[in-house]
Amino acid sequence: MKIIQSFWSGNQNDFSNACGWESYRYNWMSWILSCYQLVKYHKNVELYTDAFGYKILIEKLKLPYTKVHVVLDEVNHYPKDFWAIAKIKTFQQQEEPFLHVDGDVFVWESLTNHFHESNLVVQSMEVTDYYYQNIWSNIYPELEYLPKELAEFHNDKTNVSFNMGIVGGNNVEFFKKYCSKSFEFVNLNKKSWSRINGLHYNVFFEQLLFCKYAQSKKQEVDFLFPEIPIDNEYFGFADFHEVPHKTYLHLLGNYKKEPAVCKFMELYLMKNYPEAYSNLGAVINEFTGSSSENDYLNPEFIQRLECEFQIEIRKNSFSSGNFLLKRDLNNSGLHQRIEELFLKRENFSIVKLKGFEFKRNTSPETDELDYLVIEEINSAERKYKLDEFDEILLDELQNPILYSDLLNVMKEYLEEHNEESLNELSDVLNAKLKNYIKLKIISIYN
């Protein structure tokens, strides 16, 4: 069973197209990381793309796909917002068992080992609650043709669909018939294309139709995740700080717009594939004329920076050269480290970093909280609003301190010292410290 991915530019040929991400930079980072992680765990990983995708992903970014098919210019007559039409075209091309993996999916284990005998495979089932019904209510009145498989959904007699972050299986013949039905659903509504929200329409001619057609044919479907998210709520699918304990991430929907998530992805790419990351910087520079602080990364340079920063942390003295880069590299794996220390009840030292600035709310007309402004590489600053506990804690972290000493200091702020209060304090303190690591405003060592 081979792994396939599909990239279609929508006949736009626009390198700066963010494709739903906070910035176009993260769109390309996602493709790089997704490909490299798939190649790491699978023998055959093939790309289906158009001429522009070949130029960027293969010629410029040099992604290591085992085979590339330049066939998706054949769907350039469809509206650019119909991004799922490229997936349907790619499914239609298959003559052997496959798993299609979206470009915003990252894996840390083999997918084909799980599903090499599966009839059909999808990421998960999902409940079609308000999200589906709301967008359908705007699309349906404009349609001229409705597949019979969607009749029960339209009449509100069924409320399940599939998420197709991954999709495939051994039943290639089913995919041929499904693709024909999907193209029929789109083509017979051609007169409606200009009147409907194309981005929303994808949901119905791709995953909902797949689900209902599979059910109508009584097809056995295996799920990567047996849990059923409700109304497009996918919690934990962007937890880079849980890798490699978490082996599958899917940055769907609003995750693409969350700066913290995008920075975690960038950090993982930077740390684990520095040459690919630096190559992206060079390509960005070529297309935009901009430059990046870290266009020159390689494993040896990263190792040197990490060693330097460990010394700086222990001395609590930080040089300005490459500080943000060293801070970000140091942050990789730190969340798991503090979790392990809490679990083992081991003591450790906490050091407050630089790279952020305290901002006080000076307006008497608002009840806005004070906040931190945190510097980031190649992206906008991040803001973190402070509560009263934050202000006390950050003040106590002015100098390096042992966790045990910090806990004792914070106990002095309690009005009561019973077991319940002490346990609550410990829980809040631990949660704050873990969050400070995510924000990159502290580091630890032991």
Image (tube, grey):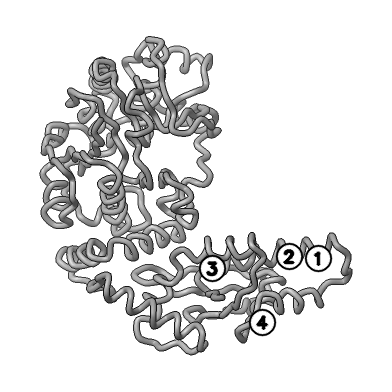
Compared across the picture, whether 55 is left or right of 201 comes to left
On the rendered image, what quadrant is the C terminus found in?
Answer: bottom right
Mark 3 nearby-residue class (10 Å; few <14, some 14–19, many ≥20): some
C-alpha gap between disc 1 and disc 2? 6 Å
Dot 1: element: helix
Query: Mark 2 = which residue?
Result: 426
Compared across the picture, whether 277 is left or right of 155 comes to left
C-alpha gap between disc 4 and disc 2? 18 Å
For marks 3 and 4, the one nearer the N-term is 4
Q: Residue 444 appears at what percent x and percent y? A: 55, 74
Q: Are marks 1 and 2 in contact (CB under 8 Å)?
A: yes
Which numbered disc, 4 or 1, marks the residue closer to the eye? 1
Compared across the picture, whether 289 is left or right of 369 comes to left
Residue type, label 4? Asp
For marks 4 and 2, the one nearer the N-term is 4
**Up/down of 150 relative to 47, above or below:** above
Q: Is residue 189 visible?
A: no
> In the image, which disc is placed on residue 395?
4
Which numbered disc, 4 or 2, marks the residue closer to the eye? 2
Decide which of 129, 306 is in the foreground and name it.
306
Q: Residue 411 appears at what percent x and percent y? A: 79, 74
Compared across the picture, whether 231 is left or right of 394 comes to left
Residue at horizontal 61 percent and vertical 68 percent from the top = 433
Residue at horizontal 28 percent and vertical 73 percent from the top = 294
Dot 4: element: helix
Residue type, label 2? Ser
Decide which of 80, 32 is in the foreground and name it.
32
Decide which of 5, 230 is in the foreground and name it.
5
Residue type, label 1? Leu
Q: Residue 78 appears at what percent x and percent y? A: 20, 32
Residue type, label 3? Ile
Query: Mark 3 = which residue?
Result: 437
